[in-house]
């Protein structure tokens, strides 16, 4: 009798549509996917005008019944409210249109009510536009939750290229931080016998290396730059789907970022914090942290406290507390983390403070 008992489910987007003026093709994309003729669009005040009303118009012209909800926060109460509205209106699927909040809310609400979800990003600031994870506020604390993977991703490079370059650079920071995430995963595999997917890890690393090696080509306000970053974010999301977890793209640098979210009065963007964290975590791994820092600089992403509104104390305290974030996930920080003295030395050595 075989002792092989492994089991996994890989959820990948069936369609990834990236390019110029692709929003007008959404009704055809929905039809091709066999989605219901009714949908709930989740937007915020900004993305409603950027793309929400346009998408709603295309869908209504094609005979779709649409409802739209404008959210303010990505918190558990909002997620429950969106899920209840989707059930009340009989929406066949949900569509998140925006940056982080509308997409995170839509994917979590879809997960809760067992419905399909389509991701329509208006900025490329993090890999959540493709992944089956969401960062939301639960009882005032930001947590990473399992969510519905998108059945499709539709990214209009014309819209994304017009978003602030800071958003695009943050997306690059999120991708570049895959380098330390994979190192942490390999460490956990060696020391804790954690399941490891060489396929997912390789895809994640290659994606990060491509951005690092071509950082100079990612420039503001060009659709080609938006194209490359969205493709990279998609590949990162696929790596997570293959792994069945966020391991290929989330390690000690993400713990650091989540600790900053809880500590800092004015946290930076998620991808910005992960990029800064990856510089320091690469140093701890004994890798070429200079290469990561130089790539982030070339992209216009922050590399130290002078580039964002974080303080020296924020950085040090986040380093000290980072190991307590998702403690079951083993990383270079171990189970006991850094002392305050070691954290300050690390931040100074890597020129983060």
Image (cartoon, rainbow, N blue to C red):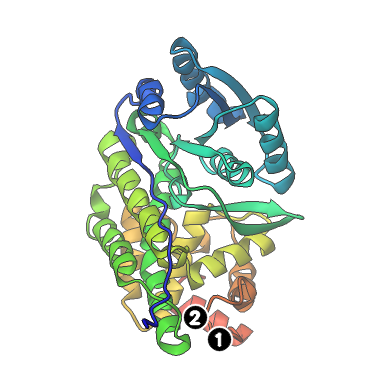
- Count neighbours of disc 1 (C-alpha within 10 A) and say few if under 14, some if 14 to 19, many if 20 or more: some
Name the residue at the bottom extreme: 191
Using the numbered discs, state the Cα–Cα distance from disc 2 to disc 1 in whole angstroms: 6 Å
- Count neighbours of disc 2 (C-alpha within 10 A) and say few if under 14, some if 14 to 19, many if 20 or more: many
Locate residue 54, reporting x and y percent. Answer: 47, 18
Q: Are marks 2 and 1 in contact (CB under 8 Å)?
A: yes
Could one spot residue 6 in this view of the protein? yes
In the displayed structure, 109 sits above or below 344; it is above
Locate residue 248, reporting x and y percent. Answer: 40, 66
Could one spot residue 350 in this view of the protein? no
The secondary element bearing badge 2 is classed as helix
Q: Which residue is mark 1?
A: 342
Quarter location, residue 221? top left
In the image, what residue occupies the spot 33% across and 68% down? 201
Marker disc for residue 116:
none
Quarter location, residue 157? top left
Is 236 on the left-hand or right-hand side of 330? left
* Front residue of this view, candidates 182 and 41: 41
In the displayed structure, 320 sits above or below 70; it is below
Is 308 on the left-hand or right-hand side of 6? right
In the image, what residue occupies the spot 48% across and 62% down? 274
In the image, what residue occupies the spot 33% across and 65% down? 200
In the image, what residue occupies the spot 40% across and 53% down? 237
Marker disc for residue 346:
2
Name the residue at the right extreme: 139
Quarter location, residue 208? bottom left
In the displayed structure, 126 sits above or below 342; it is above
Locate residue 9, reporting x and y percent. Answer: 43, 59
The secondary element bearing badge 1 is classed as helix
- Quarter of the image with the N terminus is bottom left
């Amino acid at each position: 009798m075989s002792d092989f008992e492994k089991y996994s489910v890989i959820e990948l987007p069936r369609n990834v549509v990236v390019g110029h003026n692709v929003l007008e093709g959404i009704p055809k994309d929905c039809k091709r996917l066999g989605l219901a003729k009714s949908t709930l669009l989740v937007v915020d005040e900004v993305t409603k005008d950027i793309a929400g009303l346009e998408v709603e118009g295309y869908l209504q012209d094609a005979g779709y019944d649409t409802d739209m909800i404008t959210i303010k926060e990505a918190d558990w109460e909002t997620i429950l409210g969106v899920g209840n509205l989707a059930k009340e209106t009989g929406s066949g699927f949900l569509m998140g249109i925006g940056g982080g909040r509308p997409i995170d809310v839509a994917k979590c609400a879809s997960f809760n009510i067992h419905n399909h979800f389509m991701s329509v990003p208006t900025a490329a600031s993090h890999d959540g536009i493709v992944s089956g994870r969401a960062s939301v506020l639960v009882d005032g604390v930001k947590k990473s939750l399992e969510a519905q993977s998108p059945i499709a991703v539709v990214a209009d490079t014309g819209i994304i290229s017009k978003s602030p370059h800071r958003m695009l650079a943050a997306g690059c920071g999120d991708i570049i931080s895959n380098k330390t995430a994979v190192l942490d995963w390999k460490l956990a595999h060696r020391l804790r016998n954690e399941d490891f997917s060489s396929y997912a890890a390789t895809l994640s690393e290659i994606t990060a290396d491509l951005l690092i090696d071509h950082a100079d080509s990612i420039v503001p306000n060009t659709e080609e730059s938006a194209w490359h970053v969205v493709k990279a974010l998609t590949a990162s999301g696929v790596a997570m789907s293959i792994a069945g977890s966020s391991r290929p793209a989330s390690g000690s640098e993400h713990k650091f970022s989540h600790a900053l979210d809880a500590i800092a009065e004015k946290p930076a963007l998620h991808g910005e914090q992960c990029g800064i964290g990856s510089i320091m975590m690469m140093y701890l791994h004994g890798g070429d942290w200079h290469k990561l820092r130089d790539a982030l600089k070339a992209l216009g992403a922050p590399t130290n406290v002078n580039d964002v509104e974080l303080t020296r104390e924020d950085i040090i305290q986040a380093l000290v507390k980072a190991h307590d974030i998702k403690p079951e996930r083993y990383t270079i920080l171990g189970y006991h983390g850094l002392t305050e003295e070691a954290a300050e030395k690390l931040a100074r050595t890597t020129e983060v403070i």
